Image (cartoon, helix red, strand yellow):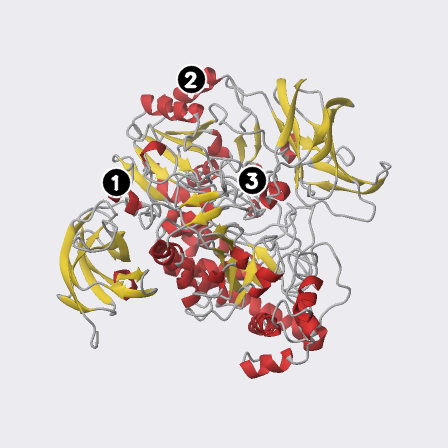
Amino acid sequence: MGTSDEEIDRLLGKLTPRARALLLTGATTWRTKAEPAVSLRELVMSDGPAGVRGEAWDERITSVLLPSASALAATWDEALVERLGGLLAAEARRKGVDVLLAPTLNLHRSPLGGRHFECLSEDPELTGRIGAALIRGVQAHGVAATAKHYVANDSETDRLTVDVRVGERALREVYLAPFEAAVAAGVRLVMAGYNAVNGTTMTASALLTDPLKSEWGFDGVVVSDWGAVRGTVDTARAGLDLAMPGPEGPWGEALARAVADGDVPGATVDDKARRLLRLAARLDALDGPDSHRPPPTGESRGGERPAAVRASSAARRDTCLPVSVDDPHGAEHLSERVPSSSRGSSRRVPTEESSGGQRSAVPASSAARGTPRRPVPTDNARGTERPSTSAPSPTRDDRTSARVRTLARRAVAAGAVLLANRDVLPLDPERLATVAVIGAHAARTRTQGGGSAGVFPGEEVSVLDGIRAELRDRAARVVHVPGPRPDGPAPPLAPDDCTDPRSGLPGVLLRMLDAEGRELYAERRLGGRLLEPRLVPGAHTVEIGARLRPRTAGRWTLGVAGFGRMTLTLDGRTLLAGDFPPRTDDPAVVHVNPPAQYATADLAVGRDALLVARREMAPGTGRATVLVAAPPAPDVAAALSEAARAAAGADAAIVVVGTTEHGESEGHDRTDLTLGATQDALVRAVTAVNPRTVAVVNSGGPVELPWRERAGAVLLAWFPGQEGGAGLADVIFGRAEPGGRLPTTWPAALADAPVTRTRPDGAGRLAYDEGLHVGHRGWLRHHRTPAYWFGHGLGYTTWSYDELTVPTAARAGDDLTVRVRVRNTGVREGREVVQVYLARPASALDRPVRWLAGYAAVRARPGETATATVRVPARALRHWSVAEHAWRTETGTWRVLAGRSAGDVPLAANLEVVPAPGE
């Protein structure tokens, strides 16, 4: 199907005005409306910044999980990110998804932002370039990407109603800039956020038209964030094109009536429908019934597509797979030690319940999130995903699966940031007799943040898994001590702690009951976190039952999360009962992370106990029901002593600390940057007895590291995705160089950060009073020194910056080419990210002290020189004139600076900018 305007207009002419209006509201939560009159099938959408979940929140339907967006930006490697975008496209096609709701292009304005892990960076230039690379990678394979959340949706507190007050110049130069880069990259959709900007909610904002559609020429679809459309006429008259989800909502029949009554011009609706048809044409969705995607998971479409169509789909899927990982070691070299449940591993690792030297063991493949599962293979490339409760079964051939794991693993190392190194890393495996791996996060590494971005990986490699695999064939002994339990709520019940009381198999029993308590259906599920129990006629109450098998005696914390009328019983005894209404209508809280209600009970080892949670469903409370359980926490002093003993007796200690899914999540911002007293005490205890201590930080955004000067090395892992432990082991043992550079400035303490506020004032307004001075710009403006600057990151070699070559003069409006010669002064080949900054000391305008203008990476062997050629776009020298509502360039003397971070720029040169001809 062509995408010519003539063809689209011909199809539009087949639809009545009412049909055109009805086309603009979703058909389901994740699907758009089909229209047989023009052979338009439904378009399937899915969350997907780090993985493609598909249409169902079901732990039995698994996805490839990549590192968090902050980790991808830390690579400063657009080619790698583009390949990862191709991997996401392959996952989307495997799951029958047309539209990926990624990337997130909001900025790290405050270090407290709860969704930092899902956003790329604090800087508009870096965010724009990395975001554009991901978009190119996704869309090169027939899947549409979505730039979100347009615009200034940079924090989570009161995000549904907050009114961001931001000046026109800051809006243009900082917050809109990444979206402009996305449009230049050809992004197919832009998502309007929940928030308001300067008094108008984004789904009704004039910003959806100007600059997005008019000045930038965006010809795609503007889709609402889910539930963000609150009115009919105001949003329809604005630049919004598609209201999601559906079928209910303020558009639909109400929009059709508004058009008929003349409240919304027909031409306005025609433009929206035309954009949706254009998107469908680009996604091959105007080919009639044969192009239909699979129905929502668990439902049968009834019938099979013709063989020719299936073959075509399979061929398109195969072209999406990453065919090269561009790995200097080679795919086989990196994959030979990949810990993988699909390779029949029988590794066992201690769990968090250990205390007083008594360590229990569970399969390593279940250490992070319960027993990993893979989806059952479908009978065609776009077939319905069916939940599996059987043994894992690969969905790709072994070579493809290994290729995917290798690429994901390489991304971990490429984004890992070595913050500090006192000649400790890399560790030499041949010189190690004992390695102590310490911390609960070592065995249960946090691979992703919380909220709508979450997926269910088929397998996860913890840091402990990765280290054990690396040392598997060597003489070194690996000792793991969990240390004290990190602060945070009790986790969902995991299958290694319980069995389904009906079948006796690991997991829980989900039952759906009617109002009389009769069972409508029952099924075994793999864990206690059930976000979308299947609805059937008459459904009234969700029940989750599990037979607990305590391995630690004492007072357990038990609970149920959700909203509405809930009860929790233990062996028939009521532990809690009550009505718990939602305190917010934020969908991330209602549907993904509802709060838990807790009770305690004494449990004994060897005596099973039946735990049953019930939750009545009611309008506005969602379906999410979570059964939680946590054993008694070990004595903190004893746990610290055990950790110190293990570290003291080891040749090297690796201590892993981090945040949690609840600490960093969509739906709320953080209130502090601390890891908690027990985790800080753990690092201090370990570093006090072993100078060869590597502190691995497992977080998606900045945290305070008060012990950073005591550690032998500090390695930032981010939320590293399913291959996290394997990729980090590559870095720790020198198989790969840590490739990451910070995409956000890292404060030593929250009080030092120049911009922290995320909470609106009493009138619901959040003022961006800092203007242009966000991130490193703010730190420089206020003459403050962070723990680590934006752009900082060490490798395994050293570099000297020898020469900066800048044109003596440049015309306003022209791009620049800057060359920086560097030399590898170390003993190992390495990669350096050369960063170029601009400054305008004599400006008549309010300017940052300096700002990122471009970057390029080079590689060199020891003693060799390399020249980084850095393109500085003309936009980097321009400012937005509020008086003229246009871009302008100051002429005169500029300063060009080059270095390895925003705070380390050893080279500088002047540049004379002259007027363009005719100015």
Q: Which residue is identified by label 1?
A: 782
Earlier residue among tags 1 and 2: 2
Element on which disc 3 rests: helix
Q: Looking at the picture, how far across and down is residue 123, in whole percent? A: 35, 51
Q: Is residue 870 visible?
A: yes
Q: Looking at the picture, how far across and down is residue 693, in whole percent? A: 33, 30
Q: Which residue is identified by label 3?
A: 365
Place residue 715 in its image quadrant. top left
Apparent side of residue 691 relative to residue 274 in the rendered image (left or right): left
Element on which disc 2 rests: helix
Earlier residue among tags 2 and 3: 3
Place residue 242 in its image quadrant. bottom right
Q: Residue type at mark 3: give it.
A: Ser
Q: Do callouts 2 and 3 mark residues in contact (Cβ within 8 Å)? A: no
Q: Which residue is identified by label 2?
A: 641
The residue drawn where x is 20% and y is 46% is: 826
Separation of residues labelled 2 and 3 (CA atoms) = 28 Å
617 or 831, nearer to the observer: 617
Q: Looking at the picture, how far across and down is residue 457, in whole percent? A: 56, 47
Earlier residue among tags 1 and 3: 3
Element on which disc 1 rests: loop
